[in-house]
Image (cartoon, rainbow, N blue to C red):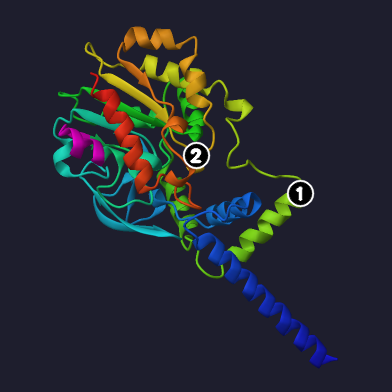
Amino acid sequence: MWRVIGINILILAVLLVCLEAALAWLVARDSPTGIRPVDRLARKIYWANVSYVQYLPDCARYDPELGYTLRPGNCVFENTGFSTELDVNSAGYRDNEASLDAPEIVVLGDSQAMGWGVGQGKTFADIIEAETGRKTLNTGVSSYGTARELMALDRVDLSNLKTVIIQYSDNDGYENRHYLSEGTLSAMSEETYSQLVAGNEGTGGGFGHYLPALFQEVRGRFGGSDGEGENSDLPMADLKDPDVLTEVLTNWDWGVAPPQLVVFDVNTGGRGGRFTEALSTSPKLSILRSKIPDLKILHTPEILDAEDYLFPDGHLSETGHQKLAGAIIEVIAQN
């Protein structure tokens, strides 16, 4: 009897190891399988084990106003599928020190603009600077919403500013709504930030991490929660977020000579696509245009394809950054 039990346990262990190996292979792929449920599972498992750069002590630091910034210096940021170096200037941005001195172009954004998953010098901000010869500062920081991005802009030398590029993500909405309702942003406490740093330890995937994520996904499925598909449109609760963004930008003090403003959205995995369509028809847009006459809105689904995003991570790949830079350069060249 005990021999049968032992054999069954051994068989079960072998099956679990094989299943873990299959999941590790799936998550480590750099391209989708083409089977939508399988690819969706790969993304779910990947993000259940992801390491966040803003909570890595070597790469980020607490900031009493913004919650955190990148840590000046050099660090390595990696997750399953990529390992990149971050060179950060004294202001806490993934850019060189020279770009802090009266830039002509400033990029605002979150992890997409920061260049999550792509090498140093490969972001669309870097490409814009290299191809136009205009000094460009990339202030993108992972998980920043538009309100925090504008607060960070206040720390930048704006004496020669001509163009501001705003990369929006659909997770910016909560922060922007809070900013409008409160008139300010209350940064997290240092204790809260330390707890998030502690919770981020040991993440990043690797063998042995995927089965628990699979079991959690199965439990969620049987519990009736099927999550959000990677190609789903903007959630109904967020359909007013274009108006919220417009109001945030309208309320900001752009000075007596407002810069050219280029706005577009980039979301992980290319999901969505309705945001800029709704933004272009927002009744409040005319108020923003009266304050910033040179306003351009880009519709990224017309620029980027599925292969322009890292799989299964969902952030822009190097080709995605290159395509986006090309489209932005065409717009700012008209100024």
Give above or below for 198 relative to 309.
below
Q: Examine the image and state in which quarter residue 230 appears.
A: top right
Check disc 2: other Cα within 10 Å, few if <14, some if 14-19, many if 20+. Answer: many
Nearest the eye: 319 or 54: 319
Residue 215, magenta (yes or no): no
Task: Tell me which label, 1 or 2, sits earlier in the chain.
Answer: 1
Nearest the eye: 246 or 68: 246
Give above or below for 224 relative to 209.
above
Residue hosting label 1? 223
Give above or below for 322 relative to 76.
above
| Number of marks in picture | 2
* Residue drawn at 49 percent across, 17 percent down: 243
Q: Viewed as shown, does residue 234 lie left or right of 165? A: right
* Residue drawn at 35 percent across, 19 percent down: 296
> What kind of residue is marked 1?
Gly
| Span of residues in magenta | 126-136
Q: Examine the image and state in which quarter residue 213 appears.
A: bottom right
Quarter of the image where the C terminus is located: top left
Please identify the residue farthest to the right as the structure is shown: 1
Nearer to us: label 1 or label 2: 2
Principal secondary structure, stretch drawn in magenta: helix
Q: Position of residue 2 (x, y in %)?
A: 81, 91
Q: Position of residue 7 (x, y in %)?
A: 76, 87
Secondary structure beneath dot 2 equals helix
* Residue drawn at 50 percent across, 60 percent down: 29
Residue 229 in view: yes
Q: Which mark is residue 270?
A: 2
Q: Position of residue 103 (x, y in %)?
A: 17, 31
Give above or below for 312 relative to 334.
below
* Circle 1/circle 2 CB separation < 8 Å: no
Q: CA distance from mark 1 to mark 2?
A: 27 Å
